[in-house]
Image (tube, grey):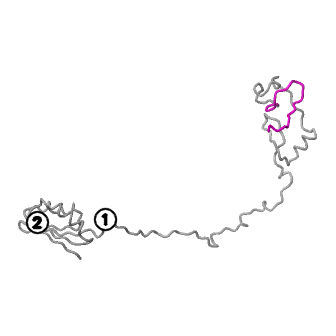
Amino acid sequence: METQEVRLDSTSALQTWLDDAFKKLAPDATIRVSVSNAEVSAVERAVKMAGFSGVEARADGDVVLVTAKRVPFSAGATVALKLPAKKTWDVADDALIDEDSLLREDDFKKPSADDLKVGCGEADGTKKKRACKNCTCGLAEEEANGVVDAAPKSSCGNCALGDAFRCSTCPYLGTPPFKPGETVKLTTVDDF
């Protein structure tokens, strides 16, 4: 262990000397300072401000004696941190759920055809019920056979003029303008 001793006559050069000594001393080295004609608190403060630790100061007549240690590490030193290990998932058999216990007796019954029927083109009371594109409920066949009700008559009289003039419950909503009495025919030509 390195030990450095110095004797000074005043505190005028003390701070400069302590700063240089701190830079040059090895970590955990000891320093002993003797200063004549000085106050104990002033010398002790100067040693602490220079970066030394474990400062012990005492007065011996008109001389102040200070013993201190340099910190046990150097500037820029690195230390590896010990991080806790990451916990992995526990996939033991006792953590798994038996899938059969999740099923009820109703789940084993075969559904009827009526249960499997999906409502196609559900009407909300304001629009006509129409079959969807991939109709599986039979509404498309009913429309093709003409079983579906005929188009209702207009209550406002503006249905032929176009969407801008039609009411919210108009059966022709979304169709192009037409002449009254004529059937609405949509062209199925691509726009490309």
The part of the chain drawn in magenta is 172-192
Q: Who's the residue at 78% across and 62% down the image?
A: 105
Q: Quadrant of residue 176?
A: top right
Q: Is the magenta stretch mostly helix, strand or loop?
A: loop
Say if the magenta span includes residue 167: no
Q: Position of residue 142 (x, y in %)?
A: 91, 42
Q: Position of residue 89 (x, y in %)?
A: 58, 68
Say which quadrant the C terminus sits in. Answer: top right
Say few, some or many: other residues with alpha carbon within 10 Å of mark 1 (under 14 / 14 to 19 / 20 or more): few
**Element under label 1?**
loop
Residue ID for mark 2: 8
Residue furthest out toward the bottom? 1
**Element under label 2?**
strand
Say few, some or many: other residues with alpha carbon within 10 Å of mark 2 (under 14 / 14 to 19 / 20 or more): some
Instruction: Indicate whether 79 appears above or below 120.
Output: below
Instruction: Indicate whether 39 appears above or below 121.
Output: below
